[in-house]
Amino acid sequence: MSEARPGFAGTGRAVAGVAAPVGAPLVQHAPRWIRLLGRRRATLVGLALVAVALVVGLLAPVLAGDPLRIDVARRLTAPGSAHWFGTDDVGRDVWSRVVYGARLSLVVGTAVVVMSFAIGLGCGLTAGYYRRLDNIVMRVMDGLMAFPAIILAIALMASLGPSVLNVIVAIGIVYAPRVARIVRGSVLVIRETAYVEAARALGASDAVIVARHVLPNCLSPVIVQGSFVFAAAVLTEAALSFLGVGVPPYVPSWGNILAEGRLYLQQAPWLVLYPGAAIMLTIFGLNLLGDGLRDLLDPRLRGIAAERTS
Amino acid sequence: MKTYIARRLLALVPVALVVATVGFTLMHLAPGDPASIIAGPDASGEDVARLSRQLGLDAPFHVQLLRWYGRLATGDLGQSIFLRRPVLEAIVDRVEPTLLLTLYAMLVAVAVGVPSGVLSARHHDTATDQALMTLALVGISIPNFLLGLLLILAFSVWLGWFPVAGYSPLEYGWLLTLRSLTLPAFALGLVQSALIARIARSAMLDVLREQFIVAGRAKGLAERAVVYKHALKNAMIPTVTVIGISFAILISGAVVVETVFNIPGLGRLIISAVLRRDYPVIQGVVLCIAGVYMLVNLAVDLSYILFDPRVRYQ
């Protein structure tokens, strides 16, 4: 496949080439970038939305009751003081399910980011640094990326079976090659720089060069991808669960609530509206945050960012 | 140029091999061996062993893999366990709605996305621009199946303008088909139009900074002519790329949206196959979609030659 590919479906990172030139090490700039991040209103809104989702997810046991308690006598009750978001078709409290759904989304999103970054960084660094392995590793990645994300995720779930862990593994496998490709692109640039040559001349081993010099310098484009991978993971989990091939139906997940809501659209639109709003706000926040991070950390676009803030 | 096309086609071979291998592995990743799944839970151990021999499942892994490549090369995707018919036949039966939905959604995505992007770029940094781009970001943040549910709620349940769900095949008249696919196509297309709008806008902004635009304005061309004639043409190159990629994204999106609207396409086929553990069908649909995806990507790359005479390949 060609080099010009979007990061992945549905995110803002589009035609831009993957082989991004690389900025100064992130660590040195930390205070400045955090300051800059707060300067744009849109990014702050994104940060706030993500923070709300985080707090709701973390405090789920405090904020909500038992998301699994069935009360058939009160099935499909409209939102009111007893049930803020109403009840579902077996009388479970929708507010509790949406709150615990946030928790599941955060767990899935975080775990997928960790997993796809671990695999992606490993493969990307190997492929970029050791040219002999490049062809093999990247062909496998290309092959995996030849499947549309959701299709590969569905197929993997078919083989793995429905569970939260399997959803994480499936989505992680889907997004790892996308991270690997970005990392490899950066490594190809970095390995030709003078400081890598200098390190080698000083007798540093490959392991030291990769860990101390290459890795820190290819992190910024990867961090930019972080919030987009997180968003994609949350969306994919919701889609898989909605289709009935994700987490088991009793687990409170936004996709599961929407799947039930589809059957009761007429009688109980709140089954769709509340989890729908939760998904939208969370993804909207992650996208705003991701755009802000990209403008700051992706030097290729820094000019545009400066223009926008001025 | 011919050698370039030949080289690109050749480069597809290793990717296709990996894709075929992944398809094969998926089946063998599943818990339990395929023979006992096909034979069903009531089959005796003897029956399972016989079936396993029949299907060649007793051969060593690499022999099975080579046979699998051979079968794929002849277009044999195997037999469905549940439907008791060739997988390829089942897929061909379900292609119509998925393909029509994808094309319709594509139309919506381009018709909404490109003009909004151009409008946004033309009124750069004004309220119009900000409103459109905020809307686009909201669009990117709504999953297509959720938008589908919201559209059903608004236009079918509350207003009653469209059927709640279902599909009317072409043989009953294309107008009915169009009506049954309108809400799904908007659910799928509007989300994608947001992405197209963002790309069209930034492509347009890049072009509008170019020297020849300044020259055009300097010689007194009307702003309309500058924007729509000179700038738009050049901004189309990155936009066309995204449109091409959108097609591939839309096909896989159609698989999800079909469930919302109960459309009997490839999406329903693969989801019901997952629920029935009908692995040959899952494998077949996945491989077909991956194949289309690869070809579309190739077509997009080759289309640069047509759209941009400056691009020359050896």
Image (cartoon, coloured by chain):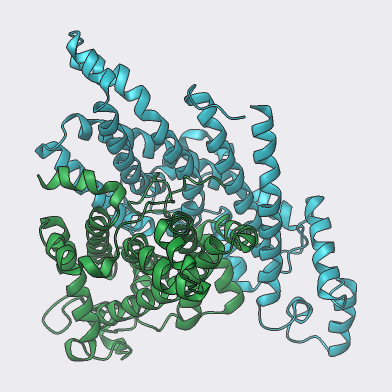
Chain colours: A green, B cyan
**Residue found at the very far front of the displayed protein:** A202
Q: Residue at 39% across / 51% down in the picture?
A: A20
Q: Quadrant of residue A83?
A: bottom left
Q: Residue B245: tell me if it is visible.
A: yes
Q: Position of residue A14 (x, y in %)?
A: 38, 47
Q: Position of residue A268 (x, y in %)?
A: 27, 69
Q: In this view, does A191 lie to the left or right of A89?
A: right
Q: Nearer the viewer, residue A150 or B97?
A: A150
**Residue found at the very far top of the displayed protein:** B219
Q: In which quarter of the image is residue B211?
A: top left
Q: Residue at 49% across / 63% down in the picture?
A: A180
Q: Report the quarter where the N terminus of chain B lies.
A: top right
Q: Nearer the viewer, residue B19 or B33?
A: B19
Above or below residue A206? Residue B137 is above
Q: Where is residue B129 in the image (x, y as percent from the top left)?
A: 16, 38
Q: Residue at 58% across / 30% down in the picture?
A: B313
Q: Position of residue A162 (x, y in %)?
A: 52, 79
Q: In this view, does A111 lie to the left or right of A77?
A: right
Q: In which quarter of the image is residue A307?
A: top left
Q: Report the quarter where the C terminus of chain B lies.
A: top right
Q: Is residue A62 left or right of residue B264?
A: left
Above or below residue A272? Residue B89 is above
